[in-house]
Image (cartoon, grey):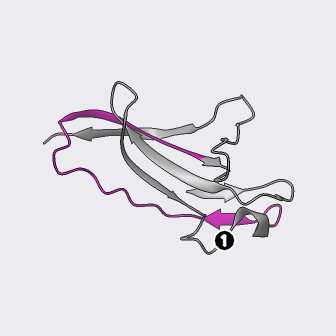
Amino acid sequence: LQWETRQPVTEDYHVFVHLLDAGGNLVAQSDSQPALWARPTSSWTPGETIEDRHALLLPADLPPGDYTLIAGLYLPKSGERLQTSSGETSVVLGSVLNRE
């Protein structure tokens, strides 16, 4: 993921990356502060690009099918998600096909 802020961030948000099945159920996830806990959002400078890698451990018994990968930011104390400019609480990164 690449993050960029246009203004200073006063809160320390966490990043979530979720893999969802066709019914919208969570099947795998990664939740952490950005950049492997090294770049809390309150340290971001406007205009700076933050590189943020996440890995998902898939369940051994994950059924074949199409899955959706989403990501977003949330406040760990409340669980409140940061909204996009269009009011969404996550962005779709793409789809994943599990053939086995």
Q: Is residue 26 above or below residue 10?
A: above
Instruction: Inspect the image, locate mark 1, and give the three-letter code of the amino acid beneath it.
Output: Arg
Q: Is residue 59 magenta?
A: yes
What percent of the width, then of the height, locates residue 5?
77, 55
The spot of residue 24 in percent (x, y) is 40, 28
Write the residue at 49% across / 64% down. 53
- Give the magenta range: 45-72
Q: Quadrant of the N terminus?
A: bottom right
Which residue sits at x=20%, y=42%?
62
Q: Residue at x 63, y 44 (%)?
A: 79
Left or right, residue 5 beside residue 28:
right
Dividing the image into 4 quarters, which one contains the C terminus?
top left
Measured from the top left, where is residue 70 in percent x and y? 49, 41
Residue 7 relative to residue 96: left or right: right
Q: Is residue 92 left or right of residue 25?
A: right
Foreground pick, 53 / 30: 30
Residue at 58% over, 69% down: 35
Most common secondary structure along the magenta stretch: loop
At numbered mark 1, what does the secondary structure look like: helix, strand or loop?
loop
User: Magenta segment: does it hold 93?
Assistant: no
